[in-house]
Image (tube, rainbow, N blue to C red):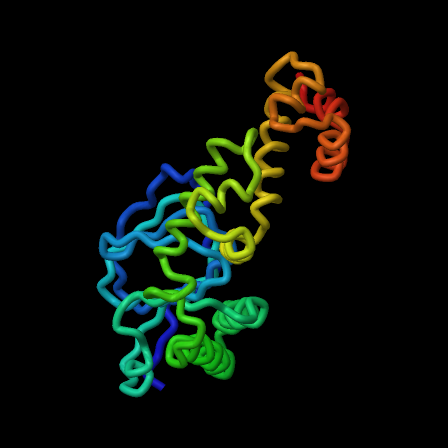
Amino acid sequence: MNIKIEKYGYFNLDNELNVLTPQRNTTLYEVEFITRANGFNYSNKKEYPILPNRLIFYPIGVRRYARGGFGCWYVHFSCSDVFVNSCLPAKRKSVIVADPQVLTSSFQSIVKKMIAGSSADVLAALSALLYIISHFAEGACADDGNSLNSESTFTKLELAKNFIDLNFKNISWKMAADHIGYSHTYFHNLFKKYFLQTPHEYIIGLKINLSKKLLITTNYTVPQVAEESGFNNFTYFSYLFKKKTTVSPLTFRKTYLP
């Protein structure tokens, strides 16, 4: 089998969205499985959102870099096998993974077997790699082009998300759906699919994060903190705060103040 696994492992990057990684050219075939995402990837000057549970293939000769943070399993390999090469995409391709745990296990198996290093282990690692590659050959659940999961759809969701980021203290998630012209149910389902939480949960998270900051950096009373964070009901704020942080707002303040 004329396939050689050259690099493998798990990559974790905790950059802010305004931080770019160094640019590089791919010299091997690269396969990545995104497990954590908050940013964008650039391939040959084209911008793609980094989304969780996506399996991505990069051919040789791609100029790539990233903005923001993400975590992924990866395998870089060379291949001169005619049949396998015929199954590989000619350009960057992303597919949605139906069973993330199975893909995670496949990448973990490659790492484990390659570290073990025996001929049998390397063969098992190659078998796992072929299974991963098969996802691109089958073309199932493609995440490129003008499908439901296209980049244009994500762009509209990003507009809604940015709208929430700027106005979360004074809006409901339904107003964000109206902002981009999506029905409430459609927007709710898409937002949860892309960002792994409902738009309501996202707004609550922003409010709680702001309240934590205000508790530590201001002299506001707890009711004032609740109001400044966008909560109209102090009792509801206290309930949610303790649910999210396991402590009351007052206990949180006493714990984190110097």
Q: Quadrant of residue 82?
A: bottom left
**Residue 147 locus on image (x, y percent):** 38, 66
As rendered, which of 208 and 54 lies closer to the eye? 208
Identify the residue at horizontal 45%, vertical 43% (top origin): 160
Q: How many marks?
A: 0
Q: Quadrant of residue 189?
A: bottom right
Residue 31 lies, with reference to residue 121, above or below; the image says: above
Q: Which quadrant does the N terminus fall into?
A: bottom left
Identify the residue at horizontal 76%, vertical 25% (top origin): 251
**Residue 84 locus on image (x, y percent):** 33, 83
**Residue 90 locus on image (x, y percent):** 26, 73
Q: Quadrant of residue 148?
A: bottom left
Is residue 181 something that shows in the picture? yes
Q: Which quadrant does the C terminus fall into?
A: top right
Going by the picture, which residue comes out furthest to the top?
A: 219
Along the horizontal axis of the image, is 114 left or right of 237? Answer: left
Along the horizontal axis of the image, is 95 left or right of 208? Answer: left
Along the horizontal axis of the image, is 207 left or right of 6? Answer: right
Residue 82 lies, with reference to residue 255, above or below; the image says: below
As rendered, which of 30 and 193 lies closer to the eye? 193
Identify the residue at horizontal 40%, vertical 70% (top origin): 142
**Residue 207 locus on image (x, y percent):** 60, 32
Is residue 30 something that shows in the picture? no
Identify the residue at horizontal 47%, vertical 51% (top origin): 37
